[in-house]
């Protein structure tokens, strides 16, 4: 019962994603064809909110549930891996017609296609885990 607030937050987030149409393949299609600002606005606002929260974490204003400081790790700069990873992520997004983030929300609306998407994402993550040590930085 102590984690009920996280369940409620997840349900609220799922409602926001579905009501904002952030799980609609039509919105993704429009975004990739630069026909609509809708998804760019959602993604842009998520970036701004994330940047604000990262600053609050780094300054020690927000703590975890036990009162400990949250210290994000500094990441190595790597342009090649960022570009290659972004290409693969974008290709998967474009081919599947769905972003990996709201897979579980999509499961509630379109079970079989979302299940195929979830299994594909898990297979991709498994393959990455196998190859990650052999990939360039």
Image (cartoon, helix red, strand yellow):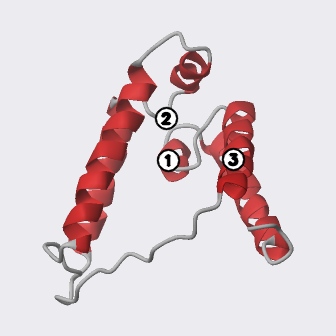
Q: Which mark is residue 102?
A: 1
- Quarter containing the N terminus: bottom left
Residue 3 against residue 52 in the figure, above or below: below
Q: Secondary structure at mark 1?
A: loop
Residue 67 against residue 116 in the figure, above or below: below
Q: Number of numbered discs present? A: 3
The tag earlier along the polypeptide, 2 or 1, is: 2
Q: Residues within 10 Å of mark 2 (few under 14, many from 20)?
A: many
Horizontal side, residue 76 vs residue 90: left or right: left
Q: Position of residue 23 (x, y in %)?
A: 49, 34
Residue in front for this viewpoint, 135 or 95: 135
Q: Secondary structure at mark 3?
A: helix
Q: Which mark is residue 23?
A: 2
Q: Are marks 2 and 1 in contact (CB under 8 Å)?
A: yes
Q: CA distance from mark 3 to mark 2?
A: 24 Å
Residue in front for this viewpoint, 118 or 95: 95
Horizontal side, residue 22 vs residue 85: left or right: left
Classify residue 110 by image quadrant: top right
Which residue lies at the image location 23% right of the left edge and 54% below the top edge?
A: 52
Classify residue 63 by image quadrant: bottom left
Q: Position of residue 105 (x, y in %)?
A: 47, 47
- The residue that mark 3 highlights is 83
Horizontal side, residue 72 vs residue 48: left or right: right
The tag earlier along the polypeptide, 3 or 2, is: 2
Q: Which mark is residue 6?
A: none
Residue mark closest to the camera, 3 vs 2: 3
């Amino acid at each position: 019962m102590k984690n009920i607030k996280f369940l409620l937050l997840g349900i609220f987030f799922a409602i926001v994603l579905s009501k904002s149409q952030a799980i609609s393949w039509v919105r993704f299609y429009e975004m990739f064809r630069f026909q609509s600002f809708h998804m760019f606005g959602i993604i842009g606002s998520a970036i701004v909110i994330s940047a604000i929260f990262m600053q609050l974490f780094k300054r020690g204003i927000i703590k975890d549930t036990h009162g400990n400081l949250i210290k994000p790790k500094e990441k190595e700069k790597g342009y090649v891996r960022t570009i290659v990873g972004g290409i693969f992520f974008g290709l998967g997004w474009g081919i599947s017609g769905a972003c990996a983030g709201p897979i579980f929300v999509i499961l509630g609306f379109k079970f079989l296609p979302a299940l195929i998407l979830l299994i594909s994402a898990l297979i991709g993550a498994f393959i990455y885990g196998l190859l990650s040590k052999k990939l360039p930085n």
